[in-house]
Image (cartoon, rainbow, N blue to C red):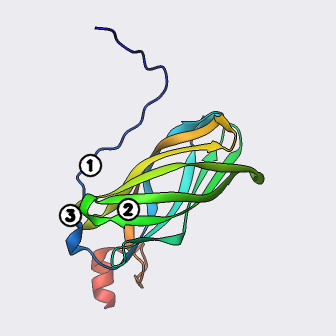
Amino acid sequence: KQKTLIDEHAYWLVGRKTLIPEVSGSFAYDKLVMLHGESASGPISYGNLQLVVDFSTGSVIDDSCFEFYIDSSNDFWSIDLSGSFLSQYSRLDLNVDSGYKNSTTAPVTGVVTGNIYGSDSVGAGGAIHLWVDGTPSDYLTGIYLAEKRAVDNTFDARLTATEEYYLK
């Protein structure tokens, strides 16, 4: 048998998908638990995610966005997301509506995939592959995992469950 040498990094995320029919309401997946990947100019240092999913309508709210920072090159990538949620597959169909690298003069396109994971849809995660328009060698690729919070949560997220109980 002939074997193929893989000379590039490969990333994947594995988890138990959520059974969605029991989930309703809107949730923001905005606490990045894990972000791992690289760009053409170095590893992803950190990022910010604002992914809002409305399970009642099956939509990803248009204000969703993802940002990435590459410390070694001072690069900043930013993309705006929209899309839909396919409940029978626990899958997010995400669209990269617009994006840029470092400034609006370097437009970015690409693919962001996602699934809803865990009991009670506690996490959203998937893969990212972006590139500067017309320059696929200038790329960013990796995986992410984020925890959810209820969009209408009025309690301070820094409080423990016991503290929240006594405030009620």
Residue with the most extreme bottom position: 168
Q: Mark 3 points at which residue?
A: 19
Residue at 33% in and 9% down = 2
Pick whichever, 89 or 149, lies toward us. 89
Q: Indicate the secondary structure of the residue bearing disc 1.
A: loop
Residue 15, label in figure: 1
- Image coordinates of residue 135 in percent, x first then y, are 69, 37
Which amino acid lies under the numbered mark 3 shown in the image of this protein?
Leu
Which amino acid lies under the numbered mark 2 shown in the image of this protein?
Glu
Q: Give the foreground label among 1 and 3.
A: 3
- Image coordinates of residue 89 in percent, x first then y, are 27, 58
Q: Earlier in the sequence, mark 1 or mark 2?
A: 1
Residue 140, label in figure: none
Residue at 39% in and 54% down = 114
Q: Which of marks 2 and 3 is nearer the N terminus?
A: 3
Q: Is residue 139 left or right of residue 27?
A: right
**Would you identify the image quadrant in which residue 62 lies?**
bottom right
In the rendered image of this protein, does residue 33 appear above or below residue 63? Answer: above
